[in-house]
Image (cartoon, grey):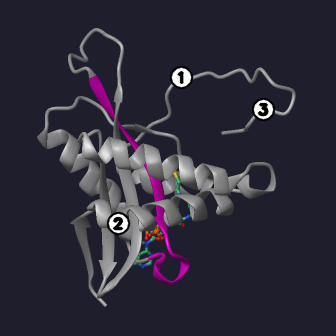
């Protein structure tokens, strides 16, 4: 079955919510956090962001089955030397349904997101990688940065 990428539309919102939830479940978040609540909050947020052009998403189709997706969020950016734009692309919600894994979908989606951002003059794309995805991002040229974080709660989230 051929892999084809397409831009997501509002009709894909339930798919994007499902894939994001499945991503968090697989990363172990379900044990400690309320994913039902998150699904609802994300759906509302993503709809608003897509409506204003601040969130674009890509879907990998395997025939008539949407097997993988990712989102690129144009998040607000404080003024920084060399980064003239007010928004910076952040790659998120990468997920491939298990039957479609290891067929290049996530790599192709990330490459499409990089191309989309590059064509629009953005200087960088950032992301937070799961352990499973580090290799594929490194192959696309992503490198670790110096972000630091300190949790303020005794049982703060790991990611
Ligand atoms: C991580 C994840 C997105 C990868 O999705 P995927 O579509 O299988 O990714 P790809 O097929 O592009 O690449 C996966 C691996 O298959 C390999 N591969 C790609 N095409 C292949 C092919 N035709 N034949 C064999 N292997 C192939 C890649 O080299 C890569 O190898 P690696 O594991 O050594 O890095 C998927 O496993 C997933 O959804 N995991 C759970 C959620 C998650 O961690 N999301 C990422 C959040 S940052």
- Place of residue 70 in the rendered image (x, y in percent of width and height, measured from the top left): 39, 57
Residue 138 visible in the picture: no
Pick the residue in front: 109 or 56: 56
Q: CA distance from mark 2 to mark 3?
A: 32 Å
88 inside magenta stretch: yes
Residue corresponding to mark 1? 146
Query: In the structure shown, which secondary structural element does the residue marked by tag 3 occupy?
Result: loop
Task: Give the Cα distance between marks 1 and 3.
Answer: 20 Å
Q: Nearer the viewer, mark 1 or mark 3?
A: 3
Horizontal placement of 158 versus 133: left or right? right
Give the residue pinned by disc 3: 156
Which residue is at a point 43% across and 51% down the rendered structure image? 137
Q: Is mark 1 within 8 Å of ligand 1?
A: no
Q: Which callout, 2 or 3, points to the residue nearer the camera?
A: 2
Q: Earlier in the sequence, mark 2 or mark 3?
A: 2
Q: Is residue 24 left or right of residue 114?
A: right
> Which span of residues is magenta-colored?
87-102
Q: Residue at x 54, y 46 (%)?
A: 41
Q: Which residue is mark 2?
A: 12
Is label 3 within 8 A of ligand 1 (CB to nearest ligand atom)?
no
Q: Residue furthest bottom?
A: 1
Give the distance between the C-alpha atoms of the residues marked 1 and 2, in whole angstroms.
34 Å
């Amino acid at each position: 079955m051929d892999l084809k990428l397409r831009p997501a539309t509002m009709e894909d919102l339930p798919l994007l919510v499902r894939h994001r939830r499945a991503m968090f479940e697989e990363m172990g978040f379900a044990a400690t956090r309320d994913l039902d609540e998150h699904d609802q909050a994300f759906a509302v947020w993503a709809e608003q962001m897509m409506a204003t052009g601040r969130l674009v998403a890509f879907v990998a189709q395997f025939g008539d089955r949407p097997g993988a997706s990712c989102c690129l969020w144009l998040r607000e950016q404080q003024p920084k030397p060399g980064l003239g734009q007010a928004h910076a692309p952040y790659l998120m919600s990468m997920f491939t349904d298990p039957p479609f894994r290891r067929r290049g979908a996530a790599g192709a989606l990330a490459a499409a997101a990089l191309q989309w951002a590059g064509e629009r003059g953005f200087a960088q794309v950032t992301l937070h990688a799961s352990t499973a995805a580090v290799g594929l991002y490194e192959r696309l040229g992503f490198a670790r940065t110096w972000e630091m974080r300190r949790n303020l709660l005794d049982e703060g989230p790991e990611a």
